[in-house]
Image: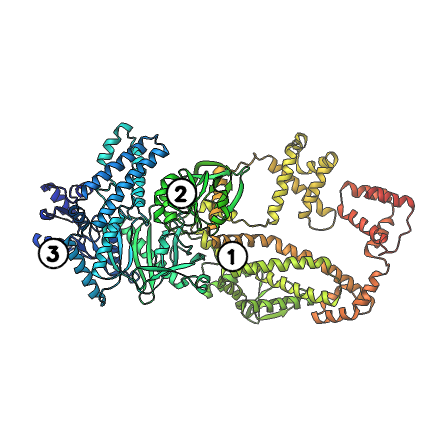
Amino acid sequence: TKTKALRRKLAPTNILRVNNEDLEFLRKKGLAVVILADKEFFGIWENKIVYEPRKLRDLIIEIKDNYLCTEAGKIGSKDPLIVGGKAAGLSELVELGKISNNIKTLPGFYITSNAYDLFMFKNNLNNELNELDLLTEEWIKKELIGGLTDQEKLELQQKVEEKAKEIYEKVLEGDVPSEVKEEIEKKYSQLSSEVGEDNIAVSVRSSGTGEDSRIAAFPGQFESYLNVKGKDSVIEHYKKVIASRFLPNAIVYAVSLRIKYLRRKIEEKRIDVKDIDQLLREDDTLRFRKMKMAVGVVTLVLKPIVAGQAYSVDPITARSGIHINASYGYGVIVADSSANLDSWFVDLQGKEILERRKGTKFSKYIKDDQGGLKRVETTKEEREKYCLEDQQILEIASAIITIRDYYRKMKNIKHIDVEFVIDEEFGLRILQVRPETKTEVSLEKKVVFVKDAGSAQEIYRGGITGSEGAVIGELQYAKTVDEVKSGVILLTANVDHRWTAVFPRIKGLITDTGDIGGHGASTSRDYGIPAIIGCNNACESLKKYSGEVITVDANNRVVYLGEAILEERIAKTEVWLEEPLPIENEFAQYEDPKEELEADWKRTTKAEQTKVIDNVRYIGRPNYPISQLQLEIYSKAFEELAKLLNITLRQKIKDNILYILFEDNIEIRRALRKKSLEELIEFDRRRIEDTEEFLKFSEEFEITPEKIERFIDLYTKVNMWMDIAWDLGVVASIWRDKYLCFVHPNYRGIFLEASKSEELSETEIRDEINRALIEEIKNNSDLEKIFIESEPEEIVQKLEGQYPEFYNKIYKHSEQFRFGPSVLSIKRPISNVCKELKKLINLPEEEYKQDYEELKIQISSMLEQYPTMAKALKLARNEVRRKETIHHLKYRAQWKISDKLFDFGKFLVEKGEFTKPEEIFNIGIEELKDKVRKYFKEYHIQLRKPSSSSLNSFLEHIFSRPNLSLQELLNRHYVIKDLQFFKLLLESLLEIQEGRAPPLELPEETIQTLYNCLF
């Protein structure tokens, strides 16, 4: 606190007597105080470098030398009050580069705030600054008191802008003091000599004393000029940068932030309205008289390949990791929001790219031979590929981590925002660093979201969340700043710094271009305005709705026509971990292949899947005897799998069990771990496609050469995917954990639920049916009483007698749990279903917490911005489902085909080829094909002849049972609702009716009894 007070006391042009107590305090703090009365300046510098005490005269000489211009490493070069925020940050990077090889900057020098003071003093502009402060404080005071109309606000803003414009013009007309000129010329000559080139090209960049600070970043508000050559040109552009301090956009931005800052202070300290005048006098934060403009002069990279911006945290969601945006050429295009950039998201350690998104990158800035830059179109080749290679991304991430850790240790700044360039000759160079202050990571946060769209029609979906929130208002499509009205949601192609003046009066923003680090998104976050940016086609799609009331949901990147119901509430949003929390996954922990092999051997041996044959370790796939036909198909499936993964799978058959060499088997997983996420998703897609095709094929399968060929092909594919299923699930879980380790454990389940898998597992399907049955029970008080008061067996009996229709629903539901075709096998599942329903009916009605559901919606929306993470979670979630569904689908199809092959086996028994029908499964693939080619025509002729079928035999059997009349038999099966029995009866009668089986000689009375029972 005392240091801050002394800084104010020692500010330039203030007259001060420093007492002995102050000097003693400063000495203990390691700070140097110098009084330079002739320059009207009293300065304070941190003195972190330990060296022998020197005479005060020597220290004064050094400070004098760096009074108007200084450079990194010199006294005052890291003080933002002297060199401004940008230059101070760059000086920190220079120091960091001395101990970190991955941090490299560009040489240059800084024109200090002292030079600015001298410029303003010599050109008689200090009184103008005081007048500007008075005008702005009139505006600020009325804003803080409240009751200001839009028209009054506009008039106050216009007065301030007019005064600022007056100062702007006087700065451009003013003369740079001779001593400042001399210092600039001297430093520029030294820089040219250092680089070894006359009149070196430089960038002349703003570095305001309030710029890039924790309170205000002033993103893109001040002018910077690139490709400036020659002393005179540098001096002229220095003046232009100073003048940009008074551009309307910069003035409005500063006033708006000061209002926001003071309003927060009033709320925190509960300051009364009548004390606002005193507050304005005492707190000079962001006051124009106090804010100075220092300027950085830095060598220009001559051949920039790519320029970009990087954050040590996602500035929108606060997700932990490195967010990188980049495009071709010079970095102007990154800041001015005029292009949609390539972007990447790298894990917190900088080792792996977790997300990537390709931008349009239609244009870039290159050096103009006449000076400055020019904008040109990118080539088709440039647009179609990412502007950076993966290795370059990881190099940038490494630099960001180094800078972030340094800032945390030295300045207690948690996150940073960095600008960089990659030069063809010099590689990666860091241009600037500043604190990332807009990201709020708090457990509880106010969230505005669309609670109910109601009758509002969705008219647009897409883009990027530039600033979170939701808003209702009139849409206005505008091409220029002057067109924009107050209180509208602005739709425009692009917003650069010239649009800043409209932000205090708009409610929302939609743009075609831009990225999260660009001017539009950054300024929207400063003003708390919901913004959807980088839409590409929003103007074309939405300009026809200009003048209409719309609802913008920036969180979900959706625009509605009309008013949707919005709700603001406190929601838990601290879902990202600052440091990754490892998730125990036995398959992800082994880096040593031998360790993984041994661990896998123990696991599979425990599951009784392994076997040692002749001192060689094998794994059974499957680990039980199978028929010759299956052996050949399974073996063929492994051959196809080896081709798919480009690995070797050595096989051995013993006792009709197919074994794979264990060392080869584990190569399946290793090969899958080398695959990209997209390749794994493609495998999953093909597996489902082939399995569903096999299931469909089973419905139309018949004994023909073509169908047998297709059966062998599809069955081989399905078995190949079965062979890969376990390992694909393992690798999917590794991908899942790679992302979830950055998510708080309390929210990992929500992330998986929000991953929007389209499928329901068998368990989830059963849960859906249970919920429907519970709802029906609760709607009938008598039925509910049965479930509450009775045991499961009693419930079954009562439902059969009193509620046969509901009993049939439970019967159908319980078939999913049935173990066989017998009557006994259905009794236990029916009882279990009733037991489960009884348990659920006694539970209190499930109430989902509102904030949980809202958070799930938010996370679902958030995942849309992280498509790779969403894909990884969806793949992992789907793999869990596959375990329940794929086997079921395969066997369902397999047994249908087996039945038809078995019938063909019967035919071959008649032909003398086999002694038993099942022998058809013990022949090889080629022999099966031969027999089908030889007999299929004759077999189909035989099928069309009436014959005694198995179903026909079933009828003969039930009608010939002694001591039991047909009516008694039917009644018995009806009571227990044996649906399988009646299904067989019906199919038998259809066979007879369609001429596929000979008619039975039955009495008319018996036929009538059958029809009465069935229909």
Closer-to-camera residue (57/807): 57
Is residue 272 among what the camera can see? no
Estimate the x, y position of residue 89 in percent, counting from the top left. 26, 53
| Distance of label 3 from label 2 (alpha carbons) | 63 Å
* Quarter holding residue 491: top left
Estimate the x, y position of residue 261 in percent, counting from the top left. 30, 38
Name the amino acid, label 2. Glu
| Distance of label 2 from label 1 (alpha carbons) | 52 Å
**Pointer 3 with pointer 1, Cβ within 8 A:** no
The local secondary structure at tag 1 comes to helix
Closer-to-camera residue (205/592): 205
Look at mark 2 in the image and give the residue it sits on. 483
Question: Is tag 3's residue or tag 2's residue first in the polypeptide sequence?
Answer: 3
Estimate the x, y position of residue 108 in percent, counting from the top left. 23, 59
Q: Nearer the viewer, mark 2 or mark 1?
A: 2
Is residue 705 shown above or below 74? Answer: below
Q: Is residue 515 left or right of residue 728?
A: left
Look at mark 3 in the image and give the residue it sits on. 52
Name the amino acid, label 1. Ala
Look at mark 1 in the image and give the residue it sits on. 732
Name the amino acid, label 3. Glu
Q: Residue at x 83, y 54 (%)?
A: 991
The local secondary structure at tag 3 comes to loop
The local secondary structure at tag 2 comes to helix
Q: Nearer the viewer, mark 3 or mark 2?
A: 2
